[in-house]
Image: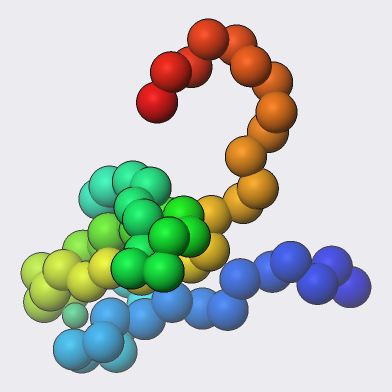
Amino acid sequence: MPSLVRPDRRCPKCDSPKYAFRARKTVESPDGTQEVETKYRCSGCDAVWKERVPAPAKPATGEGNAA
Ligand SMILES: [Zn+2]
C-alpha cells in the first residue's frame, strides 16, 4: 500500500468531507522555515479554513526564479 495517501480532510465546522480547493501559497513561519499554506472552502457550510504543512525542500534548479 502506498504510504503517501493523505488522510481524509473534513470541514472543521460541519465535518463534511466535501470541500473546494481555494488557494495555496508558501509562507515563512516564525522560526524561519518555509511552510505551504493551503486554503479550502467547505461545500456544505461555506466555512473557509487553512492548513499548513512544511514546504518540500527547494529544488536546486537555478532557473532564474528570483523569489
Ligand atoms: Zn462545513
Q: Which of 56 and 14 is in front in this view?
A: 56
Q: Which residue lies furthest to the top in this view?
A: 64
Residue 21 appears in the picture as rendered: no
Residue visible at 53% across and 55% down in the picture: 55
* Residue 66 falls in image quadrant: top left
The spot of residue 21 in percent (x, y) is 32, 53
Q: Residue furthest front?
A: 31
Q: Which of 67 and 10 is in front in this view?
A: 67
Write down which quadrant ligand 1 falls in. Answer: bottom left
34 relative to 20 in the view: left or right:
right
44 lies above or below 54 = below
Q: Which of 51 and 1 is in front in this view?
A: 51
Q: Residue furthest left?
A: 46
Quadrant in the picture for the C terminus: top left
The spot of residue 1 in percent (x, y) is 89, 73
Q: Nearer the viewer, residue 66 or 39?
A: 66
55 relative to 24 in the view: left or right:
right
Residue 22 appears in the picture as rendered: yes
The spot of residue 8 in percent (x, y) is 51, 78
How many marks do you count on the picture?
0
Residue visible at 53% across and 10% down in the picture: 64
* Residue 49 falls in image quadrant: bottom left
7 relative to 13 in the view: left or right:
right
Residue visible at 61% across and 71% down in the picture: 6
6 lies above or below 34 = below
The spot of residue 28 in percent (x, y) is 36, 55
